[in-house]
Image (spheres, rainbow, N blue to C red):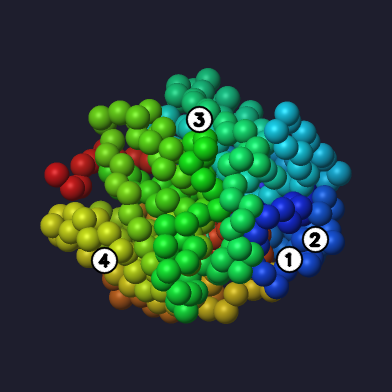
Amino acid sequence: MGTIEGVTVPPLTHEMKVMVRRNYWDFYREHAGEPYPEHLVRGAAKALDNLQRVLEDEGVTVTRPDPVDYAQTEFRTPHFESTGFFNADIRDVVLAVGDELIEAPMALPPRYFEHVKYHSLLQRYFERGARWTAAPKCSMGQHMYDYDYPDEHLAFFRGDPNVPDDVGPLAGHYMTNEAEPCFDAADFVRFGRDIVVQRSQVTNELGIKWLERHLGSEYRIHRARFRSSGPVHIDTTWVPLGEGRVLTCPARPCLSPDLLDMFKRAGWEIIEAPEGVAPAEFQLSSRWLSMNLLVLDEERVVVDQHEEPTIRMLKNLGMKPVLVDFKDHYVFGGGLHCATLDVRRRGELKSYFD
Ligand code: DAV
């Protein structure tokens, strides 16, 4: 599970606009490189502590990285310079596949060094037997981004159903190009030996190919498209609820008939998530963080205690919602799944879609 202390406002460069809601652009312009307002950080830290307590009460072993103070930290490589540091969302940065922990290259300059925060934790897992890999980092040089990508398309908010089909991601046009492989780990979601991925503003086809070739024949990668206006991360779009059930976002219907067929043929139930309750003050992500659930096992699923419609849905499915007060963490863009990475689970690795 992540830690939030020390987060610093990243600069609002062109490519960063895919992450930040338009009404906060001025805030990011004015406060680049400064710590976020203290009450927001304190609220999110408390939410994370709440989650740790709830998980431990459920018998989960929780490990957390030490906070890093990124205020006033400027960094420079031969290709770019940046400042600031993002969030507590380890799910974006590290992909766990079997006994392997893979550091994602990431795609946005303020996130270039985010893996540093997890380095000593990953080393500990390595010492206890995990395989530890870093995907090739991309340069994050200007040639990777489309600087002619119109601001109004960058500002399409994720899950906005009113965005036209013929521009932006819906027309297959992304802010990142194919100059170098890049991906965020959270654009991949695992179903045993099958992994579903979306091309997003931060994950390109070369990045997907890198992972596909790296994992080899033991895993199958399935590319999926959703009717999403500005996809960043798949974990509010297509979320496994356990064997035989996947949660889908009604504002982002799946546009890949092959994927739908594969799930249906295997007898999986595709369940529409109910809409999330109103977003928190300053929230970076969409209200669909409500479906960013952390599933513990076939029965128990951790859900924010304010998300009444989601809680009701889980109960109707016969699952046991484990409630946590997590809303104040939404400010930094991450839900329960984003802020955690399940590195060790009991049970066997299965193939669900033969
Ligand atoms: O729905 O705005 C949230 C995922 C963040 N890791 C959204 C995407």
Q: Earlier in the sequence, mark 3 or mark 4?
A: 3
Label whose residue precedes the other's in the sequence (4 or 1): 1
Residue 31: x, y in percent?
A: 83, 58
> Please, what is the three-letter code of the amino acid marked with disc 2?
Arg
Name the residue carrying label 3.
135
Q: Earlier in the sequence, mark 3 or mark 1?
A: 1
Q: Is residue 56 visible?
A: no
Task: Report the residue at 73% width, 42% height from top.
Answer: 67
Q: Position of residue 129 (x, y in %)?
A: 45, 22
- Which comes before the other along the chain, label 2 or label 3? 2
Q: Residue at x 41, y 32 (%)?
A: 210
Query: Does residue 350 appear in the picture of this structure?
Result: yes
**183 with respect to 171 (left or right):** right
Question: Between 220 and 241, which is closer to the camera in this rendering?
Answer: 220
In the rendered view of the protein, which quadrant contains the C terminus? top left
Which residue is disc 4 drawn over?
Answer: 270
Q: Cβ of disc 4 within 8 Å of ligand 1?
A: no
Q: Which residue is mark 2?
A: 29
The label shown at residue 25 is: 1
> Which of the two marks, 2 or 4, is nearer to us in this view?
2
Observer-side mark, 3 or 1, equals 1
